[in-house]
Amino acid sequence: MIRIFFVILFFISVFVTPWWVIVPLGIVLLAYFEAYLSVLLGGLIVDTLFGVPLSGVFGITYFYTAVFVILIFSTLLLRLRLLE
């Protein structure tokens, strides 16, 4: 029930709030609920709706998707290392 609440809050924040609210909510979803697909989909939505090519970052169009993919791999790596 609480996971569904946070996922819905994350997707609402993707459409309404700035990046500095979306990224911490994505981190919370990854750390506590392992909602990898939801966070990745949220990054794709942010980049599709609001993303522009960044010339300073190798012309990456999907910047937030890349940030969330890095966060997903970091979370998986930390879980693997901490649970050994």
Image (cartoon, rainbow, N blue to C red):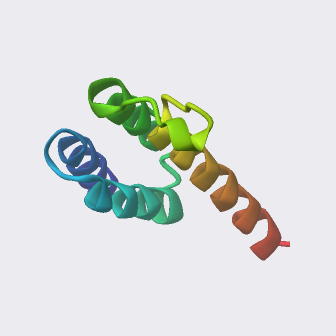
The quarter in which the N terminus is drawn is: bottom left
Between 62 and 24, the one nearer to me in the picture:
62
- Picture residue at 34% right of the left edge, 60% below the top: 25
Q: Which x, y percent locates residue 26?
A: 41, 55
User: Could you tell whether 32 is left or right of 20 in the image?
Assistant: right
User: Could you tell whether 64 is left or right of 80 in the image?
Assistant: left
Q: Residue furthest front?
A: 55
Q: Which x, y percent locates residue 42?
A: 37, 37
Q: Is residue 2 above or below residue 78?
A: above
Q: Is residue 8 above or below residue 81?
A: above
Q: How many marks?
A: 0
Between 38 and 49, the one nearer to me in the picture:
49
The quarter in which the C terminus is drawn is: bottom right
- Picture residue at 13% right of the left edge, 44% below the top: 16
Q: Which x, y percent locates residue 40?
A: 48, 37
User: Could you tell whether 74 is left or right of 43 in the image?
Assistant: right
User: Which quarter of the picture shows residue 57?
Assistant: top right
Q: Is residue 53 above or below residue 16?
A: above
